[in-house]
Amino acid sequence: MSVPLNILDLVSIREGSTARDAIAESMTSAKLADELGYKRLWFAEHHNTMGLAASATALLISQAASVTEKIRVGSGGVMLPNHAPLMVAEQYGTLANIHGDRIDLGLGRAPGTDGMTAQALARSSAEPQDFAQNIYDMQGWFSEAGQAHTMPIKSAVSAGMNVPIWVLGSTMNGASIAGQLGLPFSLASHFAPDQIDIAVKTYRDSFTTDAPTAQIDEPYVMAGINVLVADTDAEAARQFTSVQQMFNDMRTGRRRNLQPPVDPAEISAQGGTSPMLSISAVGSPDTATAQMAEFVQRTGADELITVTYAYDPEVQRRSLRLLADAWF
């Protein structure tokens, strides 16, 4: 297939394991992804979520970059309202100084958590105009001059690093912001399927190279999709029940770590599969890649970013291998 494949890692904590275990398994998978030829490995930011160890994204990125050689490593994303923009520029400038031109910075306006936790984390505004200005200043800190565009503050550690910035979003609003800023757009279709088509159209229609923040010459879309590949359709469906249980837990407010797979029939007893998982490719290599190719055709995505949860880390890594063999 011609579309590059990427990985979004939320560093799942399996039932019976710890955050330390999850991070170690994540780094093992990072090495494998690098060997298999995946283009990017991004880490998400979540808080007050006991089943995920993806909170301090810059630290995870640094560790993953240190155990890999070729794959680009970045954030999918930094939830900018939780952070001071200068600190983000300094952190990602430091990463680029240490690891070279392999670092991506995906930025989102959502807090990645509940309202109470968001208030505890809040460091900058999520308003579109403030978000855009913060990106503009961050680009200044990444420029050769290393100075923000709107204030006389410099950053030696980020100067000249030119870290690529992406805008993350799941709705028309996020898509419009990405287009108006002239930046690549990462669509969170793997958990927010309702506005996919209109969001992609809005992004392309609103895209401009005239904005001072513009970094690319034409629209560029990365779209998210849940993926679980196994030797057979039946085995993939069984393993995917771990993900289905997780999303059903989110709906009911039940707080558990990632659960072992169950008979798919049991998911119906839990209320069925969450509509949030409708953008998924689950099955044998042939089945899953056919579903992925159909999604690429629907969206016109320039890249796909895959999300693979599995209770057994070896099942997750086998999925990565089978998919790479079938896609690359």
Image (cartoon, rainbow, N blue to C red):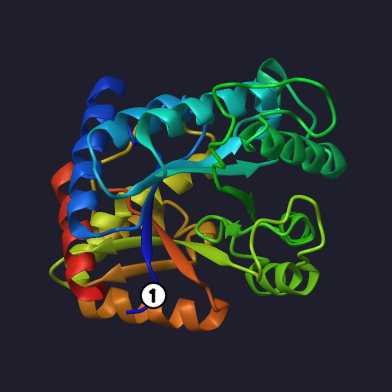
Locate the N terminus and report the quarter of the image it occupies.
bottom left
| Residue that protrudes farthest toward the top in the picture | 120
Q: Residue at x 76, y 55 (%)?
A: 181
Is 180 on the left-hand or right-hand side of 275? right
Instruction: State which quadrant residue 99 falls in.
Output: top left
Q: Is residue 279 above or below residue 167?
A: below
Q: Name the residue that disc number 1 marks.
A: 292
Q: Position of residue 213 (x, y in %)?
A: 74, 50
Say left or right for 22 vs 301: left
Near mark 1 (Cα within 10 A), the count class, few <14, some 14-19 or many ≥20, is: many
Q: Is residue 311 left or right of residue 176?
A: left
**What x and y, as percent, mark residue 323?**
23, 67
Residue 48 visible at all:
no
Q: Nearer the viewer, residue 328 or 157?
A: 157
The relative height of residue 222 versus residue 213 in the rendered view (above or below) is below
Find numbered disc 1 in the image and state the secondary structure of the residue it sits on: helix
| Rendered-image quadrant of the C terminus | bottom left
When asked about the image quadrant of residue 269, the answer is bottom left
Q: Image point 23% across, 80% down: which residue?
A: 286
Q: Classify 40 as above or below 159.
A: below
Q: Which residue lies at the image location 30% right of the left edge and 76% below the top edge?
A: 289
